C-alpha cells in the first residue's frame, strides 16, 4: 500500500461521542486486552461461528445493527518510519460495529438477547464483568471504547432499514413502471393498488 | 394482589405513583414554586408541607378530600441547600433539565423552549406542588392554604400554575379514553401483569420489578442478580423511595385535528372517520384495542376489567389490524419488536396525565382556547424510559420499519411526514400537522417521605 507523505496528524473535531456519529449511523470501536488462553480459544470460536450460520442469525435479525465484527490483534502492523515499532505483550480484541438508534439500546440488545454470545466473545478479556446485569457491562464497554478521529456515512439521512426498504420498493415498482405505459386507467388503478399492497412494508 | 416476595415500603413512597389516584379526583393543580429566599428559610416552609404530603399507604378511612405531592427540580435541590456533591449524584438528564434536551425530544419549531410559557424550562421552577381535590370547593381551599403558607414563609413565588380537570368519561381532548394502560409492578399491581407486564413465552406475562419505577429497589436488570446490587440512584438518603418525574404541558389543536381527520376520512373506507381515528391510536375512542377488535369497538369494553389490556402484537405482525405506527403500538410495542419483548421491557413508564382547558364542543368552530394534556410520567430513568420512547419510538419510525415517520397523534412541528395505515390497499395520512405543541415542561425528582424530611432538615449529606 502506498501512502501520500503525511501532512501531520489529522486533528479531530467535536467531542469524542459526537465523532462516533454521522447522521443516522453510530460507530462503536472497543479494544480490550485478552488473557493468555484467549489467544488459542478465540480463533476457534471465530471459526465455529463462521461455519455455523445459525449462531449469527440473531444478530442479522437485529435490523438496526449494520454489522458487528470481532477480531484478535496479536501485533501492530509496521508501516515504516516515523511509526515506532511496537510489540504487544498481550493479544487484544478489536470490536467494531455500526448501528442505528441509541448506544444504550444497542448494548441492551447485546446483553439481553445475545447474552451467551457476549460471554463467549468477551469472556477471555480482562475485566469483562459478564453480559448481565447490563449496568456493569455498559460501564466496561464505555471504559474500553475509543473515539474515532473521523467517521463517515454515505447516506447520513438513511438507516440500514431504510436503504433495504428503498431497494425492496424499487424491485416492486419496476415491473409496474415497465407495464404501465400501455394500460387503461382502470387496469392501471388495479395494478397500482396491488403494487401498494405488496410493497406496503416498505412504504 | 401483591407479590409477597417484594415488599415496597408504601409509607415512604409518595402517593399517585404506583397506585393511581385516577378518577378519584376531578381537579388537579400543578404549582411551580421559585425559591428566592436563603435555603434555611425555604426549608422551614418545606418542612411545613411534610405533614400534608399524601403517601402511597392504602387509605383506611376512604379517600382524603385533597392530596398534596411534592417534587423538585435540580435547581430546586440547590435552592433548598442540597450540596453540589449530592446533586451531582442525580442523573445527567435531570441535572441538565428538559429544555436543554429540546432538540433530542423534538421540541423544535413551534415547540421550541424559546416559545415556552414563562416559568417553565428557564431555571426558575424549583418545587412542584401537585394538589388533587374531589370538589371545586375543596380545590379552592387547598390552593388558598398553599398560598397562605407561602406568603407566611416569604421569599417564594409561584412562577407557573396549571389547573386541570377531568373531562367526562376520562377522555382526552381529541376524544379518546386515556390513561388506563399502565405497567404492572411486582409487589404493587401483579394482577395487572397480563397485558401490563413483560410478555413471556407460552403466553404468560411477568410484572415489572419495582425498581423500574421506584429507586432503592431491584429493577429488571438486577432482579436476578445474585449479588443483589441495586440500580443507580442518587446518594442516600435521597436515593430511597424516590422516582423521576417528567412534566410536560402539551397543547392540543383540537380544531385542526378534527379538520385533518375529517378531510382524510373522505378518502378512507367510505368516510369511516371513527375507524380512521382508531387506526391512529391503536384503540377505538372508547379504549377497545384494535388488535382484538379490528372491525368495531366492544360495547361492553371496560378498561379496568381484568384482562382488558391483555393482547400482543405478534398475531398482527403486518399491522393489518393495529397499524405498525399507531400511538399505543409505538409507545409500548410489547412483543412487536420480537425477542419476547427484550427490546422493549426497559422502556416502560407510569403515566399520570390530566387534560387541561375546556373541551371544544363538537361542531363548534375554533375558539383558539388553550387546551391539551398535562403529560406526567414516573420512571427510574428519564433517559432510558421517557426519552427513549419519545425520541426513538414516537419521533422516529426506524425500529418499526417506518423510516422517519413520526407518531401521527402527536404530529410534526415541521409539518412533514405521513402515516401508513396497513391494509389492502394501504392508506396514507399526509402530511402531518403540528396538532400537539409543547408549551413547556420540567424534569423533576419525587423524593420519598424520609428523603423529603432529610431535605427539610438539611441532612441530605
Ligand atoms: C397530547 C398528547 C398525547 C395524547 C392525546 C395521548 C393519548 C393516548 C391515548 C388515547 C392512549 C390509549 C389509552 C391508554 O392506553 O391509556 C395512550 C397510551 C399511551 N401513551 Fe399517549 N398520548 C399523548 C402523548 C404521549 C407521550 C408524549 C408519550 C410518551 C413519551 C405517551 C405514551 C403513552 C403510553 C406509554 C401509552 C400506553 C400504551 C400501552 O401500554 O399499550 N403518550 N396515549
Image (cartoon, rainbow, N blue to C red):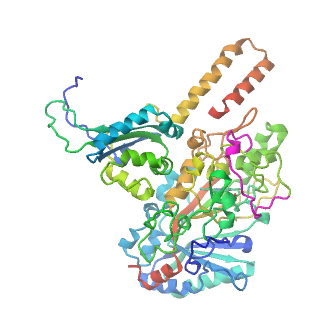
Instruction: State the quadrant of the C terminus of chain B.
Output: bottom left
The location of residue A76, given as percent across then percent down, is 22, 36
Q: Quadrant of residue B271?
A: top right
In terms of depth relative to the viewer, which is nearer, B196 or A148? B196
Q: Is residue A12 visible?
A: no
In the displayed orientation, state which residue is furthest to the top. Answer: A182
Left or right: B220 in relation to B130:
left
The answer to whether residue B20 is above or below residue A170 is below
- For the point 57% across and 47% down, the residue is B339
The location of residue B87, given as percent across then percent down, is 40, 70
Q: Quadrant of residue B128?
A: bottom right
Q: Say whether residue B309 is magenta.
A: yes
The answer to whether residue B180 is above or below residue A110 is below
In terms of depth relative to the viewer, which is nearer, B331 or B170? B331
Instruction: State the quadrant of the N terminus of chain B.
Output: bottom right
Q: Which residues are magenta?
A: B300-321
The location of residue B261, given as percent across then percent down, is 75, 45
Q: Say whether residue B375 is magenta.
A: no
Left or right: B411 in relation to B155:
right
Left or right: A140 in relation to B16:
left
Q: Quadrant of residue B414?
A: top right
Q: Is residue B283 visible?
A: yes
Quadrant field for ligand 1: bottom right
The answer to whether residue A20 is above or below residue B328 is above
The location of residue A52, given as percent across then percent down, is 46, 34
Amino acid at each position: 500500500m502506498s501512502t501520500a507523505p503525511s501532512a501531520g496528524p489529522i486533528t479531530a473535531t467535536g467531542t469524542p461521542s459526537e465523532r462516533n456519529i454521522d447522521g443516522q449511523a453510530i460507530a462503536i470501536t472497543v479494544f480490550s486486552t485478552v488473557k493468555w488462553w484467549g489467544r488459542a480459544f478465540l480463533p476457534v470460536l471465530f471459526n465455529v461461528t463462521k461455519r455455523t450460520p445459525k449462531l449469527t442469525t440473531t444478530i442479522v435479525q437485529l435490523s438496526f445493527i449494520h454489522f458487528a465484527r470481532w477480531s484478535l490483534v496479536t501485533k501492530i502492523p509496521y508501516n515504516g518510519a516515523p511509526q515506532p515499532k511496537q510489540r504487544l505483550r498481550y493479544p487484544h480484541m478489536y470490536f467494531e460495529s455500526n448501528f442505528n438508534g441509541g448506544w444504550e439500546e444497542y448494548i441492551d440488545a447485546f446483553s439481553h438477547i445475545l447474552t451467551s454470545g457476549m460471554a463467549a466473545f468477551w469472556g477471555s478479556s480482562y475485566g469483562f464483568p459478564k453480559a448481565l446485569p447490563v449496568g456493569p457491562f455498559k460501564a466496561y464497554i464505555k471504559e474500553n471504547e475509543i473515539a474515532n478521529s473521523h467517521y463517515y456515512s454515505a447516506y447520513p439521512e438513511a438507516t440500514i432499514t431504510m436503504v433495504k426498504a428503498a431497494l425492496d420498493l424499487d424491485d416492486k415498482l419496476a415491473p409496474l413502471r415497465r407495464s404501465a405505459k400501455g394500460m387503461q386507467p382502470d387496469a392501471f388503478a388495479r395494478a397500482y393498488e396491488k403494487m401498494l399492497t405488496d410493497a406496503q412494508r416498505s412504504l | 394482589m401483591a407479590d409477597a416476595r417484594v415488599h415496597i415500603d408504601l409509607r415512604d413512597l409518595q402517593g399517585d405513583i404506583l397506585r393511581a389516584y385516577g378518577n378519584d379526583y376531578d381537579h388537579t393543580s400543578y404549582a411551580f414554586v421559585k425559591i428566592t429566599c436563603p435555603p434555611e428559610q425555604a426549608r422551614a416552609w418545606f418542612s411545613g408541607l411534610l405533614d400534608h404530603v399524601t403517601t402511597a399507604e392504602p387509605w383506611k378511612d376512604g379517600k382524603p378530600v385533597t392530596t398534596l405531592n411534592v417534587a423538585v427540580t435540580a435547581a430546586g435541590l440547590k435552592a433548598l441547600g442540597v450540596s453540589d456533591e449530592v446533586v451531582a449524584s442525580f442523573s445527567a438528564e435531570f441535572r441538565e433539565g428538559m429544555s436543554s434536551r429540546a432538540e433530542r425530544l423534538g421540541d423544535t419549531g413551534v415547540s421550541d423552549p424559546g416559545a415556552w410559557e414563562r416559568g417553565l424550562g428557564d431555571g426558575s421552577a424549583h418545587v412542584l406542588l401537585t394538589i388533587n381535590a374531589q370538589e371545586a370547593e375543596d380545590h379552592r381551599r387547598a390552593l388558598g392554604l398553599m398560598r397562605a403558607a407561602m406568603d407566611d414563609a416569604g421569599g417564594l413565588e409561584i412562577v407557573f400554575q396549571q389547573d386541570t380537570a377531568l373531562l367526562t368519561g376520562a377522555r382526552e381532548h381529541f376524544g379518546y379514553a386515556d390513561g388506563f394502560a399502565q405497567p404492572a409492578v411486582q409487589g404493587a399491581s401483579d394482577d395487572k401483569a397480563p397485558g401490563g407486564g413483560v410478555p413471556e413465552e407460552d403466553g404468560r406475562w411477568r410484572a415489572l420489578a419495582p425498581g423500574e419505577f421506584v429507586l432503592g429497589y431491584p429493577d429488571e436488570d438486577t432482579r436476578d442478580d445474585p449479588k443483589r446490587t441495586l440500580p443507580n440512584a442518587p446518594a442516600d438518603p435521597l436515593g430511597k423511595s424516590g422516582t423521576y418525574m417528567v412534566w410536560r404541558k402539551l397543547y392540543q389543536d383540537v380544531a385542526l385535528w378534527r379538520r385533518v381527520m375529517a378531510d382524510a376520512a373522505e378518502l378512507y373506507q367510505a368516510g369511516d372517520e371513527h375507524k380512521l381515528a382508531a387506526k391512529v391510536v391503536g384503540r377505538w375512542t372508547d379504549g377497545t384495542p384494535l388488535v382484538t377488535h379490528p372491525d368495531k369497538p366492544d360495547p361492553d369494553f371496560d378498561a379496568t376489567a381484568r384482562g382488558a389490556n391483555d393482547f400482543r402484537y405478534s398475531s398482527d405482525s403486518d399491522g393489518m389490524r393495529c397499524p405498525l405506527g399507531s400511538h399505543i403500538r409505538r409507545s409500548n410495542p410489547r412483543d412487536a419488536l420480537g425477542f419476547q419483548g427484550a427490546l422493549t421491557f426497559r422502556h416502560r413508564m407510569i403515566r399520570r396525565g390530566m387534560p387541561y382547558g375546556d373541551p371544544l364542543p363538537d361542531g363548534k368552530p375554533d375558539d383558539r382556547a388553550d387546551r391539551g394534556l398535562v403529560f406526567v410520567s414516573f420512571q427510574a430513568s428519564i433517559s432510558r424510559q421517557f426519552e427513549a420512547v419519545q425520541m426513538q419510538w414516537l419521533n422516529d419510525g426506524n425500529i418499526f420499519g417506518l423510516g422517519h415517520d413520526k407518531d401521527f397523534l402527536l404530529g410534526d412541528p415541521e409539518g412533514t411526514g405521513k402515516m401508513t395505515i396497513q391494509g389492502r390497499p394501504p392508506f396514507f395520512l399526509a402530511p402531518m400537522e403540528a396538532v400537539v405543541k409543547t408549551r413547556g415542561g420540567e424534569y423533576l425528582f419525587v423524593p420519598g417521605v424520609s428523603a423529603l424530611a432529610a431535605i427539610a432538615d438539611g441532612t441530605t449529606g
